[in-house]
């Protein structure tokens, strides 16, 4: 392929990307104008109902908020449902950012990276035959599409690990608060307000469950997210126990004590398993690092004696 043909292909791709951006910008601008008109109508209605504050007009939104609003308008479209699927929304739930801003930024990151990475790849590695260009475009779009999800998966795994580490403390706090006579609702409220600095992940989830319960949902409905968000069987068992106590009453201290002991025993077994794996790995490290030095120290003198004897024999011959 000649240089002229390669330049024409790059220009065609750039023109196609520019056309897509212009069409998308026009559609988003139209949606934004419609939304602004609806907001203006609502403000005029509110000003008519409350004439004392009618003169104040809202300030212009910052560019981040406008960008979030434009991205949020696309979330319910077929393209938005493909770029932010249910699996991705569950992943955003695990990361604690499954709100309007989180979904909008995730959508925007996927769109921008899927367009920019192929163009960067073309400018850096674009010289070559047509198959190479197709591979650059394919891998650039695939990497731009998957990169935000990989980042969110790392964050979700970190939060899952933190939730598993915070669970024994949560159970001990529930035992303590139930022991002084507080109800389930009061215990969860105290944990949410007073211990959020030590229960950073589970405290946030309990706060969400508390808000759902205060809006009229049942205890079982409000704890469903808490029990399923991290795919942890122990969290599911704790939420099921709290729901049963809420419905049927009864003493909960002894079941929580047994449950806490079982979790601690499981953590000890997991730690022993990690130590066993680490011992095997350290054996390989010792063989690679310590064995050469040990051979030099123990057998070095013998090797030198053999080399000197052979050299003397060669000199006599």
Image (cartoon, helix red, strand yellow):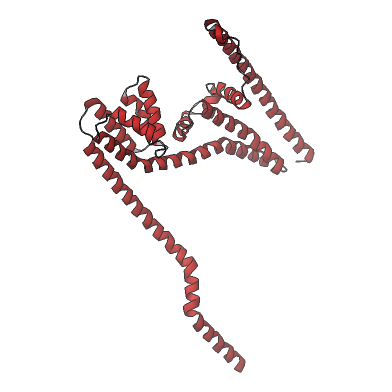
The quadrant holding residue 255 is: top left
Along the horizontal axis of the image, is 203 left or right of 41? Answer: left
Along the horizontal axis of the image, is 68 left or right of 252? Answer: right
Residue furthest to the bottom in view is 316
Does 72 appear above or below 203? above
Counting from the top left corner in percent of width and height, residue 174 is at: 29, 36
Residue furthest to the top in view is 48
> Which residue is found at the position 20% from the left and 30% from the top?
250
Does 281 appear above or below 159? below
Does 44 appear above or below 315? above
Counting from the top left corner in percent of width and height, residue 83 is at: 54, 29
> Which residue is found at the position 51% from the left and 25% from the top?
100
Q: Quadrant of the N terminus?
A: top right
Residue furthest to the left in view is 250
Counting from the top left corner in percent of width and height, residue 279 is at: 39, 60
Q: Is residue 234 visible?
A: yes
Does 76 appear above or below 298? above
Along the horizontal axis of the image, is 126 left or right of 47? Answer: right
> Which residue is found at the position 65% from the left and 22% from the top?
25
Along the horizontal axis of the image, is 48 left or right of 15? Answer: left
Q: Quadrant of the C terminus?
A: bottom right
Counting from the top left corner in percent of width and height, residue 89 is at: 47, 30
Front residue of 106 and 216:
216
């Amino acid at each position: 392929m000649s240089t002229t043909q390669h330049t024409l292909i790059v220009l065609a791709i750039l023109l196609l990307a520019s056309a897509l951006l212009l069409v998308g910008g026009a559609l988003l601008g139209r949606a934004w104008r419609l939304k602004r008109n609806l907001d203006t109508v609502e403000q005029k209605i509110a000003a008519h109902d409350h004439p004392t504050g009618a003169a104040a007009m809202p300030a212009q939104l910052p560019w981040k908020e406008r960008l979030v609003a434009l991205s949020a308008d696309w979330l319910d479209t077929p393209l938005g449902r493909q770029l932010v699927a249910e699996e991705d929304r569950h992943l955003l739930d695990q990361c604690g950012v499954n709100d309007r801003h989180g979904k909008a930024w995730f959508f925007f990151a996927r769109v921008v990276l899927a367009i920019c990475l192929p163009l960067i790849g073309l400018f850096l590695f674009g010289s070559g035959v047509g198959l190479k260009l197709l591979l650059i475009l394919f891998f650039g779009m695939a990497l731009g599409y998957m990169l935000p999800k990989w980042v969110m998966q790392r964050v979700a795994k970190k939060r899952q690990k933190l939730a598993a580490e915070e669970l024994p403390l949560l159970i001990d706090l529930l035992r303590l608060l139930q022991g002084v006579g507080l109800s389930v609702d009061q215990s969860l409220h105290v944990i949410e307000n007073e211990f959020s600095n030590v229960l950073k992940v589970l405290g946030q989830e309990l706060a969400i469950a508390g808000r759902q319960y205060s809006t009229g949902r049942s205890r079982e409905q409000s704890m469903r997210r808490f029990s399923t968000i991290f795919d942890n069987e122990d969290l599911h068992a704790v939420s099921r126990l709290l729901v049963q106590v809420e419905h049927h009453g009864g003493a909960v201290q002894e079941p929580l004590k047994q449950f806490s002991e079982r979790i601690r025993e499981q953590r000890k077994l997991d730690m022993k398993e990690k130590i066993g794996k680490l011992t095997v790995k350290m054996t390989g490290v010792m063989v690679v690092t310590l064995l050469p030095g040990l051979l030099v120290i123990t057998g070095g003198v013998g090797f030198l004696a053999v080399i000197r004897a052979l050299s003397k024999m060669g000199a006599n011959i």
